[in-house]
Image: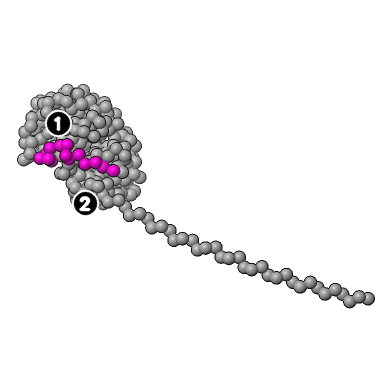
Amino acid sequence: PRPPSPLPPPPSPLPPSPLPPSPLPPSPLPPPPDPQITTVASAIAMSTSGQHITVVGNDGLYVSSDFGESFTQKAASLSSTKTLSGVAMSSDGATQTAVSGSSNAPGSVYVSTNSGATWSASTGGIPNLNVNIGSIAMSADGTVQTVAVRSGFVYVSSNSGASWTQKTTLGTALWNSVAMSSTGATQLVSSTIAVQRSTNSGSTFTQVSTPFRFTNVAMSDDGTTQYGVNRGLYKSTDSGVSFSQLTAPTFVFICTNSDGSIVLGVENVTSKVFLSKNGGDSFTEVWVRTRSLSCVMNGDGTRMVFGTTSGAYMSTDFGSNWSQL
């Protein structure tokens, strides 16, 4: 017999597969943009959507039409001798009114009809005296506007700020805050001696019985829900006819959203910021920022802006995170 055929040699081993290249290290996150507003932000206004934001302070006026991504300073178009102290805008941001004045500078009113692109002085009815215009509110369409003057009168406009009527029946007082419904029909103005309520767009006012004279007021778009602060937080659910005290921190100022369900407030001593999502029934601390001066939020309350002595800060997630504008 033939000898068995030799076994074939084993196949050569395949060369090892090359190792995949090492992944590139992740790119570093870009640094946050430099803040655009570093001055005192004494008052802020925001449109219902949050697209338009206007901030006023002691070095002028800043306007944004891209949800706060960028701001344009408008100080050059206003008198450099004025200290701006208040601002309000219509629900779409097209109509805006800024007020200025202090005890040593003439008070003035500036009106914009193109979302803050240009401004003009309104002198119809408000005396150009050394007055401190402390607060302003306007209706959703910008037609009805009310100005509260510290150590002066309350003034009402029914033509988008073109002319103003002095409410002499209210007398002079330290009028420090004003709020109104979206139609302008329901209004609330507060001073150190009285809280006054109107249901006819500021034509007449009636004094409200409250435990304290409110230092700051806010209300829902329909005017039904109203808030006032002074040594506590007070709430009305009957369009300002009566107020009851809520269990809340001692706020120095507050703001609310369109339906009054979300309330943001700054505590008087610690400057802690508290948020309520249930109409003031309970509050949660969301932030701490020293020397806060003002706050505003958009219609659904997702966007909030605080003004402080060192600039303006915004949250787009119900106050969970904040960034300087």
15 relative to 324, above or below: below
Q: Tag 1, which secondary structure?
A: strand
Q: Nearer the viewer, residue 233 or 129?
A: 129
Magenta segment includes 76: yes
Is residue 253 rendered to the left or right of residue 126? Answer: right
According to the picture, the residue beneath numbered tag 2 turns out to be: 290
Res 19 visible: yes
At horizontal 23% and vertical 25% (from top left) the residue drawn is: 143
State the count of labels. Answer: 2
Magenta segment includes 65: no
Is residue 18 rendered to the left or right of residue 59? Answer: right
Q: Tag 2, which secondary structure?
A: loop
Res 230 visible: no
Label 1 crowd (10 A; few <14 / some 14-19 / many >=20)? some
The tag earlier along the polypeptide, 1 or 2, is 1
Q: Nearer the viewer, residue 236 or 288?
A: 288
Q: Which mark is residue 71?
A: none
Tell me which segment is drawn in magenta: 70-83
Tell me where residue 107 appears, x and y as whole percent: 10, 35
100 relative to 35, above or below: above
Tell me where residue 319 appears, x and y as whole percent: 32, 46
Predominant secondary structure in magenta?
loop
At horizontal 33% and vertical 54% (from top left) the residue drawn is: 31
Q: Which mark is residue 121?
A: 1
Q: Measure the C-alpha gap from mark 1 to mark 2.
A: 34 Å
Tell me where residue 121 appears, x and y as whole percent: 14, 31
Q: Residue extending furthest right?
A: 1
158 relative to 10, above or below: above
Which amino acid, mark 1? Ala
Q: Quadrant of the N terminus?
A: bottom right
